[in-house]
Image (spheres, helix red, strand yellow):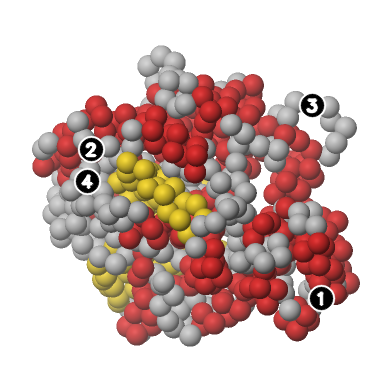
Amino acid sequence: MSPVRHSQVSLLHIVEGSTHAWEAEASGMGRIFGSLAAGAAAPDPAELAAVSARQRHGGPDGHQVLRGPGWALGCDRLAVSDPRGGRQPYRLAHLPGVVAVLGGEIYNHAELRRELAARGHRFPDLCDGTLLPALYAEYGTGFARRLDGMFAVAVLDVRAAPRLVLAVDPMGGRPLHYHQGADGAFRFASEIPALLAFDGVRAAPRADSLDTVLALRTPISARTALEGISALPPGATAVVHPGRPAALRRRPPAPEAPERGPRSTADVLRREVRRLARADVPVCVLTSGGLASGLVTALAAEYAREAGAPAPHGFHLGFRGRWPGGEAAYARAVARHTRTVHHEVALDPAELGSLLTLTTRHLGQPDADPAALSTYALFRAVRRAGYSVALTGDGADELFGADARTRPAGTGPFTADWAAAYADGLAAAPRLLREYLYTPDYRAFIEEEGSAADRVERELRSAGGDRLAAVAAFEGRWRLPSRHLRRLDHLGMASAVEARTPFCRPSVAAHARALPSRLLQDRRALAEAGRELLPKAVRRRPRQPFALPVTAMLAPGGPLLEPVRELLSAERLARAGQVRPDRVRTLLARQLERPSDRDALALWALATHELWTEVVRGMRVPADCAA
């Protein structure tokens, strides 16, 4: 892979050419954490240092913690814009007692700053998060409704009775996890491993976590796989007072400004790609070879040509050796057509065993999607090449129609149980296989408690009306943020790379919701958008998820076979008492004799959950989990 020099400066800097133009994009990307409890004692600095160390990989460019009677607020910063400004936590001289931290970016901060300045507020720099104390002072706990961006925010107000306000963006692009103890002490952090470094937060896997992983591949809700730890839902605000339960409010998104005349999918996406391609550090593109990433690559390249800037650099991940499902030829076709500088990252499959442990640590929750390993490896290569911002095509499936998973909700007859069929499409192991693998005690427990799949089915059926609309709403509200965006955030920041997702902008989501159903079948709207931008072979190819060929890699002699076999030893499984070791052994034997996608994914899910339970229990010992 050829080196990338830092002379690949931001596109906006080249286009606008003025200091004010690029400073207007200043941002405070990074990791945040804090606590609020009743009492006069300030939190222990050593404890706060341990929390910060657990997520410092996502904020290596700056670290600061403020603490006082019963409270603490901290940030680990990744400087993607205005590296010299934007010191966090944010404080304004004329608003003593109001402090804020920001993980993510606020895109409309220049507009908000002008509005707040007209009301008498003054700011020491042009960083996006600097305006947060003033915005809170003007709008109170509803301040986040004024924000446009991908963000996780915490504002602490200690002017009278202490109050902590947390908020995340409507798409859930920047996760925030929290825990409230029996004594009312409230603690939060961007990542679960960091949250577990707080005293009083236990690393206790939920009893139903295995069923959740087999049924959904990863937890898809505000409830995590750990007892007492929750994720703030997309578009939610939490208001916390010392010693009292947090009050959660899900706020409606701010209305989109009306468009003048009809806009095509390509035009809506073009605007967001251009907005997200701006930074004061090098910006690259992830080019998988699929339709969605191809569109983002093409539009970024178009922007660079119009700006007179160098061609963007694109990155594609493959595996050394001969493996099925490779997309390198399609990625090269996209690069040739768009004239980007193309990099192919060739991962040695022998590394996958060690990458599995690192990936599991960074995610903090079990994730049975094999794409997690590929994602971690790709972002690691991007960072090594000199980039800290990457544009991706994630989110297109959930918004513009995906694959066989959503077809049961189509316009066909109601003879089949479409909600159950959709839920089975999410599974790492179908319901009958799960019930076959479970011990009698665990099967009885799940029947009594209810499966994660049952909860998904109930939510879909309760929506009523249009089945496709119900599925789209569920995917946008839960599956996209809980599965894709969380993985992008955690595994990108594991290498200090900020993943930016043009498809996950509110304007693109609103455009997709307004399209007729026929354009969401087989992603027709995206294929049409690529008519003038991408080669025909890429526009017409069947969808293929970004993953690794786990079926082939679990075949005899495959590089993942021994790590999985070790994780699924009879002794390990018997200790947990949730699955029958003899039946897991039968499943593995069948996979070795007749490799199949279904059996391979079920084995992979069992192994990743087993590894996660071991890794997460070890997180109670404060240590940095960065690679």
N-terminal of the two: label 2 or label 3? 2
Mark in front: 4 vs 3: 4
Q: Residue furthest front?
A: 321
The residue closer to the viewer here, 258 or 547, is 547
Q: Which of disc 3 and disc 1 is earlier in sequence?
A: 3
**Mark 1 = which residue?**
581
Residue of label 4: 8
Residue occupying the point 75% across, 84% down: 571
Find residue 536 and report its horizontal and vertical position in percent: 51, 24
First in sequence, mark 2 or 4: give its number.
4
Are dots 2 and 3 in contact, CB under 8 Å?
Answer: no
**Would you say residue 305 is visible in this rendering?**
yes
Q: Amino acid at mark 2?
A: Pro
The local crowd at label 3, few if under 14, some if 14 to 19, many if 20 or more residues have their Cα within 10 Å, is few
Identify the residue at the far left of this view. Answer: 18
Q: Nearer the viewer, residue 376 or 620?
A: 376
Position of 90 compared to 270: left or right? left
**Structural distance between the alpha carbons of marks 2 and 3:** 49 Å
Residue annotated with mark 2: 310
Foreground pick, 87 / 408 = 408
Q: Is 236 situated above or below 267?
A: below
Task: Specify whether residue 175 is in view.
Answer: no
- What distance separates the C-alpha of mark 1 from that of mark 3? 41 Å
Q: Name the spot of residue 165 as percent of width and height, x first.
A: 40, 59
* The N terminus, quarter of image: bottom left
Please report contact status of discs 2 and 4: CB closer than 8 Å, yes or no: yes
Badge 4: few (under 14), some or many (20 or more) residues near its Cα, within 10 Å? some
The spot of residue 510 in percent (x, y) is 49, 30
Dividing the picture into quadrants, the one containing residue 622 is bottom left
Q: Nearer the viewer, mark 2 or mark 3?
A: 2
